[in-house]
Image: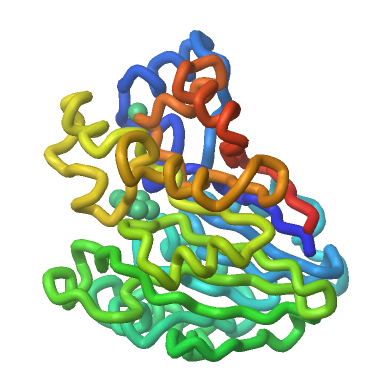
Amino acid sequence: MKIRVLGAGAGGGFPQWNCNCHNCHRLRHQQMQGTARTQSSIAVSTDNRNWLLFNASPDIRAQLEAFPAIQPKDGIRDTGIKAIVLIDSQIDHTTGLLMLREGKPLDIYCTEMVKDDLTTGFPVFNMLSHYCSVNHHPLPIDGSSFTVPGIDDIRLYGQALKSKAPPYSPHRHDPHEGDNVGIIIEQISTGKKVFYSPGLGEIEAHVMDAMQAADCVMVDGTFWTDDEMVAQGISHKFARDIGHLPQSGTGGMIEVLDSLGKMGEKRKILIHINNTNPILDDASAERQILTEAGIEVAYDGMEIDL
Ligand code: MLT
Ligand code: MN
Ligand code: ZN
């Protein structure tokens, strides 16, 4: 299977429109080694023609324009996007649905909790009913697999995660299973698996199992430290409070990824990187630590062949 990183940034992207942090400032002024990142999305295909989109980013228009394999091929209106999987109802993962309103009905796979948010607090599905309309398909989180018509040779498993529903969710302060999921994407004929989880607050046992079984993990790369935004005077929110495990420190993502085994056996990729994160600087000491640990940092346009 082929995985295309459409956007490797977290909410806000890099640089963020109103941000003058160390990274955003230096990127704008060509003072750092690094590249801009659009907001969080990947696409997966086994035939390079029919694509399963994971999340619909506010930057989707530019992401599709930068990727010929997903563009119209036949007829006056066409797309390579056969269906969409949503891992949560966050703005950075769902706003792009509105950009797809000119097309045919959208086949969207998401949990009942995510559908709830997208028909109440952020009623994108209701809005789209006046344009292309949405065919909602329940995304199971009971361990059963699902397949998507038109996406050959791929089987998917949703994993409920401990994270948070977004601020506009009616159950923001009352967490439910299915507010956030990680996804195991398996190619049936080869047995190769990717674990995709751009928002991981806690490594529960079933998440560890999924990461161990995967040939490639694409996991939460949002923050280097828990207090990253607080220390830079940007926000009062800590990484763990908003459902993101930081990379550094005890119990951090680097330790977790290290425990999965030696370099080379498994691809370990950080994705959904916030603009404050020092790993966006290719020449930073933090980036060097990742390189030595065999951990890659996703970038827009990155392609993984498994
Ligand atoms: C998150 O994952 O925490 C989001 O990117 C936050 C946001 O979009 O505002
Ligand atoms: Mn996000
Ligand atoms: Zn910034």
Q: Is residue 62 visible?
A: no
| Residue 24: % across, % down | 40, 23
Query: Relative to 201, is 235 on the left or the right?
Result: left
| Residue 229: % across, % down | 23, 33
Quadrant housing the C terminus? bottom right
Quadrant housing the N terminus? bottom right
Q: Is residue 243 visible?
A: yes
Indicate whether 122 appears above or below 11.
below
Query: How is this picture coloured?
Result: rainbow
Residue drawn 51% across and 64% down?
55
| Residue 98: % across, % down | 47, 67
Indicate whether 296 appears above or below 279.
below
Query: Relative to 185, is 192 on the left or the right?
Result: right
Residue drawn 70% across and 53% down?
4
Indicate whether 211 appears above or below 77.
above
Residue drawn 62% across and 50% down?
6
| Residue 15: % across, % down | 43, 30
The picture quadrant where one finds residue 288 is: top right
